[in-house]
Image: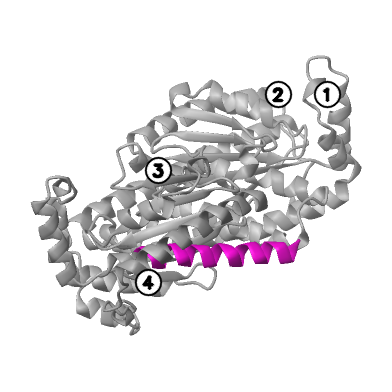
Amino acid sequence: MLEKLDLKLSLEKASYKAELNKLMPQLRWLQSSCWQYKLPVIIVLEGWAAAGKGIIVKKIVKYMDPRGFTLHPILPPTNSEEEYPFLWRFWQKLPPIGKFSLFYHSWYINVLEARLFNNLPPSQVSWRMNDINAFESQLIDGGVTIIKFWIHLSHEELKHRLKKYANDKLQGWRIRKEDWQQAQNYDKYLELVEDMLVNTHTKAAPWQLIEGDCKYWARIKVVSELVIRITEALQQHKIGLVEKEKVKTTPNLSLDSDFIKDDFPKLPSFLDQVNLNLSLEETKYHHRLSLAQVKLRQIQLKIHQAKIPVLILFEGWDAAGKGGAIKHLTRILDPRSYQVHPFGAPNEEEKKYHYLWRFWQKLPPKGTIGIFDRTWYGRVLVERVEGLATQEEWMRAYEEINQFEAQLIHEGYLIVKFWLHISQEEQLERFQNRAKDPLKSYKLTEEDWRNREKWDKYFIAINQAIARTNTPQAPWNLVPGNDKYLARVYVIETVIDAIKKALKKKNHKN
C-alpha cells in the first residue's frame, strides 16, 4: 500500500496557510454538528517517529472547543494496565456520544513495536490483528466514527528529522531509543507496517495514508481528509437517526413464530434438556457445600500465583437463585481477590457508550476473580424481548459477544457461564413467598411480574442466545435450579473443575 505513495508531493508555505485557514473553521463547525447529533468520533494518528504527528494534533485542537475532545497520548502500558487485556485501556478512553477522542499513537503502536523487538510471539500476531478489527467493528456498528491515519516518511527523511530533533535542546527529549530503532531497522519496520495496514484496512475503518516528507502537505492532507470523512459520517449518521425513528414506530416482530421460522434454523431446546427434578438431600448438601467451599478457597491462592483472571457470569430467570449461588460461592473466599458486580439497566452515563463499555470497566485483573450478576447477554435477552434494542442490534450482538469473549480468552481469561433454570411453577411459588416475607419483599417488583407474563418469549430468546454463544472455549453451564441446594453445589463444583483445567493447561504450557 505504501509503495503507491508519492513522497515528493509538496506544498508551499503560503498555499499551506491559505488552505489551513479555509479548513479549520469547517472542522470547528463539524465538531459542533457532531455534538448536536450525538456522533462520537475517534481519530487515530500513527506514523513513523518524527513524522509531525504532534504538530498536526496542535493544529487540529487549536480551532476545536476543548470541552468536546480529549487527547490521549499513548505510552507503553503501565504495570497496572498490563494486568488487564491488551485492549482494556483503550476501552477506558472511548469518547461518549457527541465527543472526539484523539489518539496520538494507539492500539497499533504497541503491536508494531512488540513485533519489531520480538516481544510478540508470531502465533499471537494473527489473533491480535483480528481482535483489533473486531474492536473497531464493534465501535463502528455501535455508532462511533473511526478515522485512522498513517503518516509515511522515506528512510532519508526519517534519519534527517531524528538527527535534527536530537540536536534541538527543546525537542531532543522527545526522541526515544525505539525511534532510533525504526531508522536502524527501516526495511523490517516497513514490512511490519505494510502487514498491519493490509490486515486492518477494512471497509468500515480504512487507513488514510499520508505522504509525510513535506510537513505542509501532510498537515493539509490530514485536516482535509478529516473534514471529508466527518462530513460523510454525519450524513450517514443523520440517515441512521431517521431509520431508528421509523423502527420505533414499527411493531417488534423479533419473537413471532414466522420470524423464527424464516430467519433461524430449527434449534434444539437447551432448556428443555435440563432435568429440573434433580435434588440434593440436606445432609449431603451441607457436606458437599462445605467441602467445595474449602477447595475453592484453596484454589484461590493458585489462581493468584498463576496470574489467571477468572470471570464467572450469572444469568437466569427472575428468582432463580443467582444471589444465593453467588453468596455461597464467595462465602469463605478471600475478599481481597474477588469482586461481585451486579448489572441492571444501563444508567444515563453508560448509555453514552457502546453497550459493552460498562463491562470492560469491571473486568478482573490477573490473578483475581470477577463475578457478574447479569451480563452483556442482556442485549439478546431483556433488550431484545422488551424492544430496547433494534432487531439489527440484537442480531449483531451474538457475533459481538463471541468476539468479546474470544478476546478475553486470548488474553488468558477463564470464563465460566451459568444459566440458572427453574420451572414456571417454581418461579411463581418463589414470587409468592417473597411477597409474604418482609425481609425479601423488596426483591419482588412489578417488572418481575411483567417479565413472567412474557415467559414464552424469553424462553425462545434464551435458547437462541445459548445456541449462538455456546462456544468450545466459553460453554454454557445450565444449572437445574428448582432445588436450591443442588444449584448452589453445582455452581461451586463446576467453577472448581473449570479452574483446575485452566491451571493444568497453563502449567502444561510452562
Dot 3 crowding, Cα within 10 Å, few <14, some 14–19, many 20+: many
Q: Rounded to the nearest whole Å, what is the CA distance between mark 3 and mark 1?
A: 39 Å
Secondary structure category for the residue under label 3: loop
Residue annotated with mark 1: 165
Is residue 58 highlighted in magenta?
A: no
Q: CA distance from mark 4 to mark 3?
A: 31 Å
User: Where does label 4 land, which residue?
Assistant: 478
Asked whether 385 or 438 is in front, the reply is: 438
Q: How many marks?
A: 4
Q: CA distance from mark 2 to mark 4?
A: 68 Å
- Amino acid type at mark 2: Lys
Q: Quadrant of residue 476?
A: bottom left
Q: Residue at x 39, y 75 (%)?
A: 467
- In terms of sequence position, does the residue under pointer 2 or pointer 1 come before the other? 2
The residue indicated by pointer 2 is 13
**The residue under label 1 is which amino acid type?**
Tyr
Return the x and y of residue 119 as percentages of the image width and height. Answer: 79, 50
The residue labelled by disc 3 is 353
Q: Nearer the viewer, mark 4 or mark 3?
A: 4
